[in-house]
Amino acid sequence: MPLTITPTPRGLEGVVAAQTRLSHVDGIAGELIIGGYELKELAGRVSFEEAAHLLWRGALPGTDELRELRREITPLRALPEDTMRVVRAAAKAPPIDALRMACATLSLDLPDPDDIAPSADIEAAKMLTARFPTLVAAHARISEGKELIAPRADLSHAANFLYMVHGKEPNPIAARALDTYWVTVIDHGMNASTFAGRVIASTRSDMVSAVTGSIGALKGPLHGGAPGPVLDMLVDIGSADRAEAWVRNELKAGRRIMGFGHRVYKVRDPRADVLSKVADEMSAVHLEDRKLFDMARAAEQTILKVLDEVKPGRNLRTNVEFYTALVLQALGLKPRSFVAVFACGRVAGWCAHVIEQHTEDHLIRPQSEYIGQRGLGLER
Ligand code: ACO
């Protein structure tokens, strides 16, 4: 019987590509469920390590389980020499590219990289999650010609990252802000990078290969690469009273406004709410951050108004990246590293999806609709 091919919407919009217990995005209600909990239930109330356990094991850890997870992850933070060689070779590359290249080397360190049994996958997940912050911090230090700082076992995942980047222990507000940020972005339904990772895993390929592919998908400005440009935009706008003219000009030139619009959310992204509170708290520390935050909040309202007017019916609302830019800036991180810092949180979610896809064990292999010519003949 001939196979019927049904044309799908462009970009698979609205297509259900997998069943998952990990997270759910309700773009109409503006809700994000992670492992059964609404984001607002988790953010600021559980640590990143607890959220990772929730995704990998299906439940939040008890006190002993959390202690055990931390005891296992902490020694994995240090990077093998082979990986460090790649980080050094990529010193001039953008941090997200360095992360992708270095991530690919991490299978060298696994006893059997092709073992995709759930237990081996969880070990690989711990290793990748433990090392991503070390990779990003090492690359930041090397690219600025600074001394490397070894990870510290007595600090939390988030505090240790800030320590390795800045060379001093962060204040608790900063460590908590980064922790909340990583919980907020840990997983988000069938986004492009997660889908890319699941496609790779569906071929029974290994965890490191899948996560390396996910990094490549995250990098683009339509996905995780937006917060750097958001900050450039805010700097360019300069003051709230210039926002309207600025945004009208961009839209007239056919450019997109970074930090606005989403494939699924037709209302405000719930992660923007969480992160605007975090950015607000963070900006209490430095006057410059407070000025930027106040300006951004006022500019946001103007941008939304103009988007509604110029792009009516498209429901373009603030997405996660708008306030991500302010949080990461207030943490003293460089805009070029923003997407790599995002990956440090999302990696735990990618790993959970790879585990789920390996368990599902079904090849993802869609069809394409051929729109090229047929019946051409060679004139030779
Ligand atoms: N600024 C201006 N116009 C926009 C924007 C925007 N940010 N987003 C969408 N539009 C317009 C498009 O130009 C299009 O207009 P048209 O109908 O006149 O042609 C219409 O809205 C629909 O656009 P699509 O590209 O079909 O919408 P899609 O759902 O594919 O886009 C996306 C989602 C890619 C996130 C888009 O909103 C965008 O480019 N936003 C800016 C980049 C950004 O902030 N990315 C981060 C997303 S969050 C994340 O991935 C972690």
Image: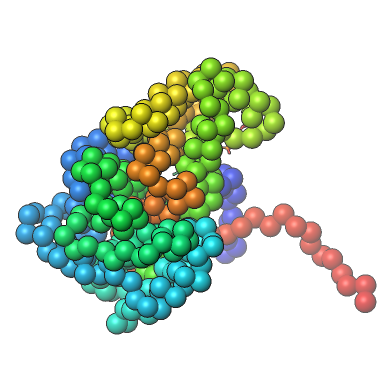
- Quarter-of-image position of residue 371: bottom right
> Could you say which is closer to the camera, residue 54 or residue 109?
109
Give the percent coordinates (x, y) of residue 165. 35, 55
Furthest residue to the right?
A: 379
Instruction: Establish if 217 lies above or below 326.
Output: below
Furthest residue to the front?
A: 146
Residue 276 visible to an observer of this rendering: no
Give the percent coordinates (x, y) of residue 284. 29, 29
Give the percent coordinates (x, y) of residue 129. 30, 62
From the viewer's perspective, tell me whether residue 211 is left or right of residue 167: right
Instruction: Establish if 301 lies above or below 342.
Output: above
Instruction: Establish if 167 lies above or below 74.
Output: above
Furthest residue to the left?
A: 64
Residue at image point 43% right, 58% down: 140
Give the percent coordinates (x, y) of residue 118. 26, 70
Residue at image point 54% right, 46% down: 221
Q: Quadrant of the N terminus?
A: bottom right
- Quarter-of-image position of residue 160: bottom left
Furthest residue to the bottom?
A: 111
